[in-house]
Amino acid sequence: MASRLWLAVHLPSLPLQVYGRSAAETFALAVSERQAGRERIAICNAPAAAAGILSGMPVATAQAILPSLQLRARNPAVESRSLARLAGWCGQFSSFVAIRPDGLVLEVGASLRLFKGLDALVLRLQEGLSSLGFAVNMAVAPTPAAASALARNGGGRVHEREALPAAVADLPLACLDLDGSVAEALKRIGIRNCEALLRLPHEGLARRFGAGLPVYLERLLGHCADPLAPYVAPERFAAQLPLPAETDSHEALLFPLRRLLLELCGFLRARERGVSALEVQLFHLREAATRINLNLVAASAEPEYLLGLLRERIEGLGLAAPVVEVGISVLRFQPLAPATGDLFGETATAEPAHRLPERLQARIGTQAVASLGVQADHRPESAWCARPPGKASALPHESASSRPAWLLPRPQPLTVAEGRPCYHGRLELVQGPERIESGWWDGADVQRDYYVAAGPAGNRFWVYREPAGQWFLHGVFA
Amino acid sequence: MSLEQLLQRNDVWRGRGRPIESSGGLPTGFAALDAELSGQAWPRGALVEIMAETSGIGELSLLLPSLARLSATADRRWLAWIDPPYIPYAPALAAAGVDLSRVLCVRGRDRDESLWALEQALRTGTCAAVLAWPGQLDSAQSRRLQLAAEAGDGYGFMFLPAAAAANASIAALRLSLQALAPGVRGRRLAVQLLKRRGGWPTGPLELELEESGDDTAVASSPSAGRA
């Protein structure tokens, strides 16, 4: 069995990034929370820090320094939802992902061969996370507790258990998973870093701070097991991203939608699924949300292709009101068919055939693109139906007498001259009659005598006569 | 260099000689028409303009054998119908041998959308054949569609109004159809090749469209007020 290696991902500015990752970082954003009885700045982003905003500063002061500062209240529920979605996304790199209070821990020892080495895996993870909009610190260690502690300190790699005591020696106490009161008490007795803590006798620690602390230290060094509960993603995907400022520009919506699509596709890859129907919600402040449905002919897990379809759909959309939040939820998952090549393929198409109807439907509308099907009904208007693109009709065709290639949507009444119907000239009846009498069971019963009629210009029409004597044109033999 | 060698070269255009042979095309299904076309098949990666005097003379039946042949191959690409003037009647198409699950019927909400859909269908190479009723095209649109057809390397059939026959066009093949008196086996068409590759305009060719179904004449003359 491969030795277990843990990779910890630490998100130092998670409270900020749940708001800030929906747009490029061009404006000042800060997150406030209640500290010591007042609303204070918890974290601010780089443009805000450049303007002089500091963490711990009262909110009123911050707004006086920078009136254009965007301020958001810290929302732990949104943070934990983001972490959960991120854990689902990380499932494409590891089969065991656990959530910690401020980050994630992945077991990567079993994935090293698939990703061709630790460096490649770390690089891909880093690139993926930054394209989602998260700035992270990562560390690798043989135990999850050590990996988390190293990640909080900014990073580091340890491969052997024997090297752990040396690696964690210089870690400040703030990086360890300690209660606030325990950390305060340790500081008071002069313990500043991890090395000093590890030198203390365990019985004394247990008596003074409770049995939890020595157990944690044992787990840190790998002397005893550290059981973690893996994160199991639910079988559905629904994600939202609040926008930093309300917007009604289509381009501005594509940025957060792209990030959500990247999250979705990571989630899909982890489960080897594709999405064949998804719904995009654009939330407004007061009006009901605008919902956009995207249906695909074949399941896809490619973010750029889905973004292209969404762009077509959104560009033609008129927004009722400015948008404050965007969301994506998946309506239908499907197992993803791996792309196989054609051994005897003559034509190398640039893209799979199913993409054409998807792209057309994204721009023109779902009902504008359809395949045809045959139904078992004698009435000509019911003998055909529109089917979703690519779906065959289940009924085998039974060959009847000649049928026209064109059918009129509604039979057109014809004038009669000298006992014969007229359509741009007198018509000559060539074949017939064919009596079609059907439909008594659903109220649309018909009783018609169909004829093939020839017009003066040489064209052929499909006309019928009702019992009352009225003539209609129903089809054209093109 | 002897005359024989000169004539064997591909870059010599012979005004009234046999068209240049090429392999692997889509025959039209009508021997008289095949004989006059370059490669004895529809031109690939190019537009074919079909101008009928009126609709209903058999302009679509001219193509149905080719569509049936495309349906029979293992090619899973679409047979796209862009903005047809009426409803393509599924039982008739199925009787002609067209695979209905590969038919893609597209209707744009306005002309711009239809032209965009037509260009997409031609350009992406996802359609084995595209049939379109685009209305009057100006030269810029026509050129754009021709470039799209070249990129997609499929078969594109444009059905244009009869008046378009008088305009110049960059399509590779232009046919003008007229109805003739019906023959023994069915309707007959007179086909003028207004433009073709590897030859001067020619015609009229007489083609017989095979019709399925019984040939019984009218059983009884209908009179008004029959019970």
Image: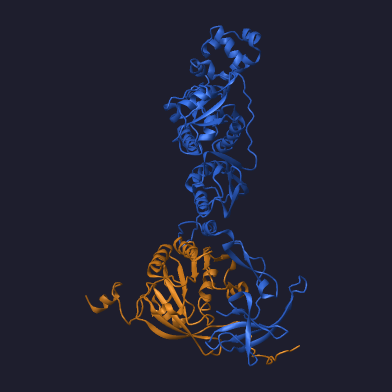
Residue B11 sits in quarter: bottom left
Residue A301: image x %, image y %? Answer: 54, 47
Which is more toward the observer, A428 or B6? Answer: A428
- Above or below — where is B226 with respect to B194? below
Residue in the picture at 50% in, 82% down: B54
- Residue A141 showing in the rendered view: no
Residue B99: image x %, image y %? Answer: 58, 69
Chain B pictured colour:
orange
In screen coordinates, is A396 left or right of A31? right
Q: Quadrant of the C terminus of chain A?
A: bottom right
Residue A260: image x %, image y %? Answer: 54, 42
Q: Quadrant of the N terminus of chain A?
A: top right
Specify the farthest residue to the left: B1
- Above or below — where is A350 with respect to A254? below
Residue in the picture at 62% in, 66% down: A386
Which chain is represented by blue in the image? A
- Above or below — where is A179 with respect to A115? above
Residue in the picture at 47% in, 36% down: A130
- Above or below — where is A443 with respect to B223? above
